[in-house]
Image (cartoon, coloured by chain):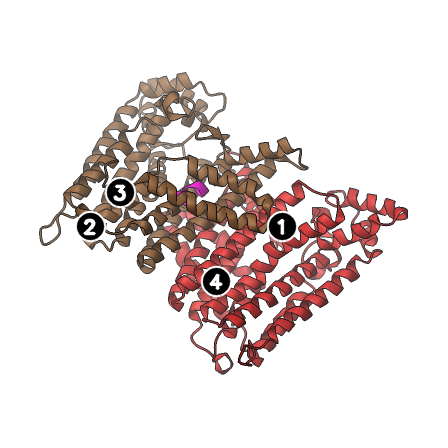
Chain colours: A brown, B red
């Protein structure tokens, strides 16, 4: 990042300081809480691309009249950024229980690591259930601490009344997206058009709003941004957020395991219901002579015994990957277009410097290889 | 309750209104979210003795100089009370997953009800895991909405900076208590003195702080109470809160199923590690001629095949029940004593009217039969 973007070292310092304080509160209650606290602290400090705080920061800079000359004190914004990272930790820890994922960021998932602690110590009871139980509680704690950091940041910036509705909307939206993901995988339709609509709905709430749109929004309201700037950021955020998820879906099938840190075709084995899959299924369903491919695809996706090479080959032979690339390009273009709007009195909705930062981050988020 | 206590109808109205608004936000995202939202709404509206909002309300009245003449507008306090009920809903929904409890408040636990929805609808996948997954997410949503209601109430009262640290402490403490409960049951000691110390630690954080002490504290800071009043309420709350849990432990063994709504000896089957059990074990362990009783007790407690009648008889033959009663009485006395303190200039720390309400609620909470 250039200097106008988020200072990730400063964010890390805030996370280190705040998590040490929270850990100390637990250890003061009982020293035995140090070990589970350490699991949560390490998970937050070691991981992630800090994408939500990056968008938050640029939303804040976009909302500041003096953004290109340095802006004002950003320490309150760093607390909001730390809140976003704790919220994300909570979501990932609970998601891994829900998805029964064994690994995360190249290490055992939190509930698996806790189950291993139990087994190693030779404790009584079911190690797997202990791992799930402790992970539910640590995810709850991360969510509570996220809220505490949000309040601290909003108080420091003097924007609790303005920021609270955005924070509320973001948390409700991401959880709604997770519930929809669960319900649409469970009460599953086989109609490709409905599948695509469901996948887009989940993308919109579980990823786009949560990862890009609301962090930008939160930053903008924290800066007291004018309405035109907020609207432009919301439109930019929605488009870039959906494009981000489409890239994620593409990497989940075609990504290089050495770069992504996940097994090849991970989404196929997991049975993730993506736009890519829905588009490919629509094409195969429309050609009677491709019924065998559709059958193989439907039988393989979501099966632990899936032949990933065969499934990948079937998808590659459809227009799915090219269609997804076209959509990503179109979304990036329309998202950037929103930043080129002007206010009623003819000023740009974001300054040239901030626009350049936003474009850089949007391109990184949608063209990444991991 | 007399008129100076919480108006539970007004609290219910706030819960109905706020939950309807949150439900509508979910349905606006997708109508399919109506069904899971309804499960959460019904759980909050149908249940509970509203004990935390009752203590919150009296903490608030205790902190007001004009408490005995009616006090000021309480609508912000009702929002805080609603926040406490949502927090409790979240804790219970996640607890039932952790404890693998099938029933709650005379109905299927949330994860069991959701699993039954899945099975009834004939959806794909594992109904039990679906129930657990949806319950984790609904518990998360309840926790998020609790925080949103806290912020709304604290903003309405103009006390965000004063109330936020109390809200933070309460949430960290209850989760610490739950983690300790999990870890002390798992890495279990058989030494009666250590068992008793662990049970008291869990009582203090999982119940006393969360149920009595911090709700009072939150109400007091919301009213801008003087330091002496806050300190008296904290001491009162700690004692009454621990006594409340000791009564809960007694009811968990000797409670009348027709009144408690739980099976006889439920805590014995579940293997709950209570002060009552630790005290009884200490007595049996000290008498070599009672080794058979101790062996039966240790083999039976926590076993699904436990002979509840036999275990209850063993406990009844010890001084455990009487010791627990004596402790409850002593805690109620010392808790009420804290309310009789005076300020340095000789005024009582709480008014006569509020003291009477607090005593009434303390006696109800510690002498209840259900």
Residue A200 percent across, percent down from the top left = 33, 38
Residue topped by disc 1: B103
Please give the range of residues in magenta. A85-91
Q: Nearer the viewer, mark 1 or mark 4?
A: 4
Location of residue A223 in the rendering, given as x and y in whole percent from the top left corner? 25, 53
Residue A336, by quadrant, is: top left
Q: Quote the CA–CA distance across marks 2 and 3.
A: 12 Å
Give a yes or no on whether discs 2 and 3 share a subunit.
Answer: yes
The answer to whether marks 1 and 3 sit on the same chain is: no
What whole-number distance in Å separates the C-alpha atoms at marks 4 and 2? 35 Å
Name, please, the residue furthest toward the left: A346
Which tag is nearer the camera, tag 4 or tag 2?
A: 2
Mark 3 falls on what kind of element? Answer: helix
**Chain of the residue under the numbered disc 1 shown in the image:** B
Q: Secondary structure at mark 4?
A: helix
Spatial separation of the CA atoms under disc 1 and disc 4: 24 Å
Q: Nearer the viewer, residue B324 or B272?
A: B324
Specify few, some or many for label 4: CA neighbours under 10 Å numbering under 14, 14-19, or 20 or more. Answer: many
Q: Secondary structure at mark 2?
A: helix
Q: Which residue is identified by label 3? A: A237
**Circle 2/circle 3 CB separation < 8 Å:** no
SS under mark 1: strand
Q: Which residue is mark 4?
A: B82
């Amino acid at each position: 990042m250039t200097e106008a973007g988020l200072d990730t070292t400063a964010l890390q310092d805030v996370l280190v300081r705040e998590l040490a304080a929270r850990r100390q509160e637990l250890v003061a209650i009982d020293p035995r809480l140090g070990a589970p606290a350490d699991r949560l602290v390490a998970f937050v400090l070691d991981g992630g691309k800090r994408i939500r705080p990056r968008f938050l920061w640029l939303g804040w800079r976009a909302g500041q009249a003096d953004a290109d000359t340095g802006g004002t004190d950003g320490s309150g914004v760093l607390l909001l950024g730390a809140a976003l990272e704790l919220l994300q930790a909570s979501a990932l820890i609970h998601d891994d229980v829900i998805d029964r994922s064994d690994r995360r960021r190249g290490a055992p998932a939190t509930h698996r690591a806790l189950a291993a602690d139990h087994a190693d110590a030779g404790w009584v009871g079911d190690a797997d259930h202990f791992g799930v139980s402790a992970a539910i509680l640590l995810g709850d704690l991360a969510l509570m601490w996220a809220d505490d950091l949000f309040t601290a940041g909003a108080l420091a910036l003097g924007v609790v009344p303005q920021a609270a509705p955005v924070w509320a909307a973001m948390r409700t939206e991401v959880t709604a997206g997770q519930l929809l993901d669960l319900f649409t995988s469970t009460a599953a339709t086989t109609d490709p058009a409905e599948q695509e609509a469901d996948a887009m709905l989940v993308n919109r709430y579980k990823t786009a709003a949560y990862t890009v749109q609301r962090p930008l929004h939160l930053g903008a309201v924290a800066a007291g941004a004018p309405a035109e700037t907020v609207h432009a950021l919301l439109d930019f955020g929605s488009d870039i957020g959906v494009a981000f998820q489409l890239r994620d879906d593409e990497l989940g099938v075609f990504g290089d395991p050495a770069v992504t840190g996940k097994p090849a075709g991970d989404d196929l084995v997991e049975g993730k219901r993506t736009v890519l899959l829905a588009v490919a299924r629509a094409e195969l369903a429309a050609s009677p002579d491709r019924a065998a491919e559709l059958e193989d695809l439907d039988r393989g996706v979501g099966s632990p015994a899936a032949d990933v090479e065969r499934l990948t080959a079937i998808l590659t032979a459809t227009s799915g990957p090219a269609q997804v690339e076209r959509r990503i390009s179109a979304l990036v273009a329309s998202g950037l277009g929103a930043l080129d709007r002007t206010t009623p009195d003819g000023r740009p909705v974001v300054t040239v410097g901030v626009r350049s930062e936003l474009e850089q981050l949007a391109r990184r988020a949608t063209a990444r290889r991991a």
